[in-house]
Amino acid sequence: MILSIESSCDDSSIAVTEIATKKLLFHKKISQELDHAKYGGVVPELAARLHATALPKILEQTESFFPQLKAIAVTNAPGLAVTLVEGVTVAKALSVALDLPLIGVNHLHGHIYSLFLEKESAFPMTILLVSGGHTQVIDARGYKDFSLIAQTMDDSFGESFDKVAKMLGLGYPGGPIVEAYAKKGDANRFAFTVPLANSGKIAFSYSGLKNQVRLQIEALGTLSDQDRYDICASFQLVAVAHLLQKLKKIFKTASIRDFAIVGGASANLYLREKIEALCEEFGARLYLAPLAYCSDNAAMIGRCGVEGYLRGDFTPMEELVSSPKSAL
Ligand code: KG4
Ligand code: ZN
């Protein structure tokens, strides 16, 4: 079995995965969303302090698995520097105490492996990763064999939902709230323009759209509930339309048979619906992670860790450092 730890942002999570069957034997996550909600975003120092109490609390519950563990997998990049180090330190202490090798897991690889929980991996695949920190289209060919097809030039897709929610005073994380508000709104009331619509560039940009929303909020002055619903609906329509326009260009130039969406924002049902239609149009199969494992969790880190273990891809203790910025 492999014990895995995730603490790259505001979720403290630990999982135990059986190596031979890929079965998830234990998974627990303590989210800090409520603690950060009043600040409208994650406060890194507060997140680190909360990990320091939450991780040991979850770890205690995994003690019965200790004799059967073969390795410790831990997210070491990318993420918040002060929170990554909390998980990495717990992993190192466990590695010393139980005499087990370490496997450093890239958080983005973890999101990709959320597609393969309790099953075999299936590559090649083209993957859209939409989270709070990233918006990328990835050519995924196999374990650690990933390359970027497109990425955002500024804000990420999930981050833009967080920022719109913050501007509307709706709390954090913004994604689920904006999606729920959008359901009650008129998506055609505000005509926000689709970013990079007239550019041939295969890239994403969300900072301009965020500014359009800000200006609209300022122009309205006092907001009614209906104004908020309509802003969320109009924003979500354009945020997703932007992804779809660029994805369509990618589908037209490459022959994609297998496509997937991963990351926290892949839980957005409106986005899922639109991507389903896109895949149908191009005759591609669509793969999705279970809704409960789209946002950050240790199960996906453990699933990726199993692949590392099977390949003997261990990380020496002195090389296991947390790096906030890290490529795919
Ligand atoms: O993958 P994740 O849990 O953390 C990162 O690695 O960043 O993703 C969190 C992000 C947040 O920005 C959150 O607002 C967004 O995913 N998100 C959503 C939805 N659920 C979560 N964005 C849009 N619609 C949603 N339903
Ligand atoms: Zn994530």
Image (tube, helix red, strand yellow):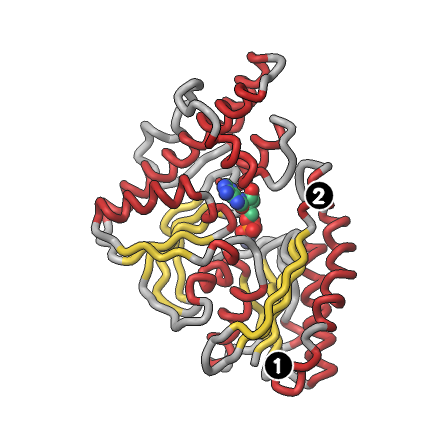
Kind of residue at badge 1: Pro
Count of marks, rendered view:
2
Reading the image, the residue beneath label 1 is: 101
Residue 132 visible in this rendered orientation of the protein: no
Residue at image coords 48%, 54%: 291
76 lies above or below 286 = below
Q: In this view, does 91 lie to the left or right of 227?
A: right
Q: Which of marks 1 and 2 is nearer the N terminus?
A: 2
Question: How would you rate the neighbour count of disc 2 (Cα within 10 Å): few for under 14, some for 14-19, many for 20 or more?
Answer: some
Question: How would you rate the neighbour count of disc 1 (Cα within 10 Å): few for under 14, some for 14-19, many for 20 or more?
Answer: many
Q: In which quarter of the image is the N terminus?
A: bottom right
The kind of secondary structure element at disc 2 is helix
The kind of secondary structure element at disc 1 is loop
Residue 170 visible in this rendered orientation of the protein: yes
Q: Judge by depth and name the residue closer to the eye, 24 or 279.
A: 24
Kind of residue at badge 2: His
Q: Judge by depth and name the residue closer to the eye, 199 or 129.
A: 129
Reading the image, the residue beneath label 2 is: 36
Q: Tell which residue pokes out farthest to the front in this image.
A: 184
